[in-house]
Amino acid sequence: MHIILLSGGSGKRLWPLSNEVRSKQFLKVLKNPQGESESMVQRVYRQIHEAELSATVTIASSCTQEESLRMQLGDEVNLVLEPERRDTFPAIALACTYLALEKKVTLDEVVVVLPVDVYAELDYFKTLKEMEKVVLSGDAEIALMGIEPTHPSEKFGYILPGVQKSSLVHSVKGFEEKPTITRATHLFEQGAYWNGGVFAFKLGYLVNNKDILPPFQSYSERYATYGLMKKTSFDYEVVSRCNSLAMVSYKGDWKDLGSWNVLTSVLESPSLGNSLIKEDQGNTHVINQLDIPVLALGTKNLVIAASYDGILVADLDHSSTLKEHAESLTKAPRYEEFLWGTSQVVDVPSGSKSRIRRLMISPNSQTKPLVNTQLLLHLVVIQGEGSVEIDSEINKIYKGEVVTISKGVTYSLISETELILLEVPIAD
Amino acid sequence: MHIILLSGGSGKRLWPLSNEVRSKQFLKVLKNPQGESESMVQRVYRQIHEAELSATVTIASSCTQEESLRMQLGDEVNLVLEPERRDTFPAIALACTYLALEKKVTLDEVVVVLPVDVYAELDYFKTLKEMEKVVLSGDAEIALMGIEPTHPSEKFGYILPGVQKSSLVHSVKGFEEKPTITRATHLFEQGAYWNGGVFAFKLGYLVNNKDILPPFQSYSERYATYGLMKKTSFDYEVVSRCNSLAMVSYKGDWKDLGSWNVLTSVLESPSLGNSLIKEDQGNTHVINQLDIPVLALGTKNLVIAASYDGILVADLDHSSTLKEHAESLTKAPRYEEFLWGTSQVVDVPSGSKSRIRRLMISPNSQTKPLVNTQLLLHLVVIQGEGSVEIDSEINKIYKGEVVTISKGVTYSLISETELILLEVPIAD
């Protein structure tokens, strides 16, 4: 089995913790069984291995997420990175082409596609095996996962099951997009399932099917012409046109961690970071990434999330509209994670154009080459030891030293111990 | 008439906007009739002048507030600064000694003492004139202001009026400390008044009365022995022992701006600073002094206050207990205002002891002499022009320059234009 994990998302629905460069799936707000922090993508990746599916895993993501994925999952994982963001159909097509032409996966092997931001039990992953069986048996060209609903919900699409073929497998009678609450109640009573956005099919069904995908001789050709592919969803482009569908049902915990409302419901502790919750009236959550304290006093049903990008205070029942409001607040991210360490904008003095950054470089690491576009750039070494490479010349740097970079000059920083620097640009 | 404005307060009840060096009375959250921002102390000072009382004004405050008072009220105002914080009796005694011995005010002139954090109409200040008349007429040695209550409240002390002497004046039958709500309802029905903490008396009643205050030959003698005076309130030490009291009543707007609950009720706009309030369920207030945005989404009856000292999210009905909770969060203030400008801690990198500050120095100003206690201190000039004085030697500094100060060296900064500097200490 070959699993394709879809790791997309614009990062606005969990503002201000997620942003353009740090999507929600990388937030380390969950806990693994050892009590250590883990992110959504780390959790799903761990569970896939725990479910012993003997599957390969390929992450279909955007090129902006490469460093985050490598940092969180290591160098072993296969990455298929979209050169630009489109929709699920092009992303899945690109990943399948990669499996067929680069990884030489044979066309009758089964591919299972699932989202990265799902919060589910191990049984969910074991259901993938059942989906593979249905496809391998030839009973259906595409198997879908149907989640047994616990209540009528207007937040999910529904699968209408047809004939029951075995304890877990039904044929598919039809689909419904996110319904009204009245319609959802009717669907719930009729025994419809939530559509989990999980698909299984033989690799050849997609890459050897001219009706769906024009054939390509090489992965690089597909990659180079990615920008020409239709922005359309896999549901619309492939599933809705397929006449041979089956649904494999799953019963158990299943949550889409895409909103504060849901995410806070799975957090083990009411607060993360420097915070104090007093006289709580119930269901107050604080997630604070700043170094100043947050005090929540007498609050109720609230999420308070603070990062260097902004501060959110939202009633949990209103968090679903966050995305549209956060759009207008999004500026260039102030905090970024790289393979070599982190960068944090600490001050933007009013009346000046200088963005002052603190760089923390992990021991024995090196930044990418950086270019100074300002009049001058002072690098103040606050702690640690290392070197600076300026125009191919390498010089040692020590605590307390100030290195000044002229305009247009390329530099790169190399650490021996952990290196903390303040980067102070002087504007024209 | 000589007005003594009591400007005390520990600054915890409006955390995180107020702190040890920046008390609530200096927060510029109110608006004057021209629509410009003003603080509590500026508002009261302006109203005293508008009421045309032909009074001198003396501010009784702590020495930690000198710069803030000078900045907000100018150089003309009389300041009497406690060398250490005690209670209202010593503070009023010190100010009266100052009036008698330094300002040579005659002992039969009337002194009126009032708090600085009151929010009232102009009639309130006109009532002070009535209080002066009562004292001058000899009808009472101390006149108190009784505020006509609008509802039973457990938050205030009460004055029980005796015989009515004129339309506004009663004798005083007794006092009650903050009552229970049942008792407050009874007092309200019986026609008791709120005790506004406003006192009028002849200067001689306090400074020429051995029973109350041991006599002193000079103000400096009183000042030098200030630390020996009893920590006790003027109510307890003077008013409760006086047999000749009158109450002058005031009817009109009157609020004690000491809690978020009350302060937010007088703000003209629901938000100050970089903020967005969406899907408000009623009575949401945001006061944001940070440069990152605050988004309030679907909230109700909430104050959100953010400063470089911390972030508060409080239900307005719970804000009265803020003081006790804020105590545990108070660290050295990160933002300070001086006569020469402002200082802002912008970063305290974890793993280092460096507090990195941004100094903004107003044009043509000079800092006090500062001593570098760290291993090294780099001053990076981000914008503007001026000079630095190091060990009595003055050198010009320009944008982009880095000045390095050695350990133990005294320096001071002098601006020509507005000067923005980053102060980067390197710890031992």
Image (tube, coloured by chain):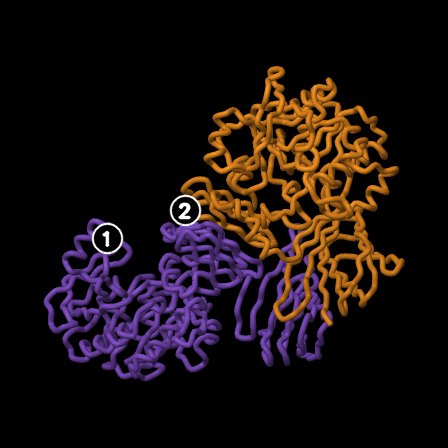
Chain colours: A purple, B orange
Q: Which residue is mark 1?
A: A179
Q: Position of residue A131 (x, y in %)?
A: 22, 75
- Kindly check if marks 1 and 2 are in contact, taking CB atoms under 8 A apart as contact: no
Res. B298 mark: 2
Nearer to us in this view, A332 or A230: A332
The disc labelled 1 sits on which kind of residue?
A: Pro
The residue located at (22%, 66%) in the rendering is: A146
Residue lying at the far top in this picture: please name it.
B166
Instruction: Identify the subunit bearing mark 2.
Output: B
User: Which chain does the residue under circle 1 lie in?
Assistant: A
- Residue B287 visible in the current orientation: yes
Q: Are marks 1 and 2 on the same chain?
A: no
Give the residue type that dot 2 points to: Gly
Quadrant in the picture for the N terminus of chain B: top right
- Look at the numbered disc 2 and give the secondary structure of its residue: loop
Q: Is residue A202 above or below residue A326?
A: below
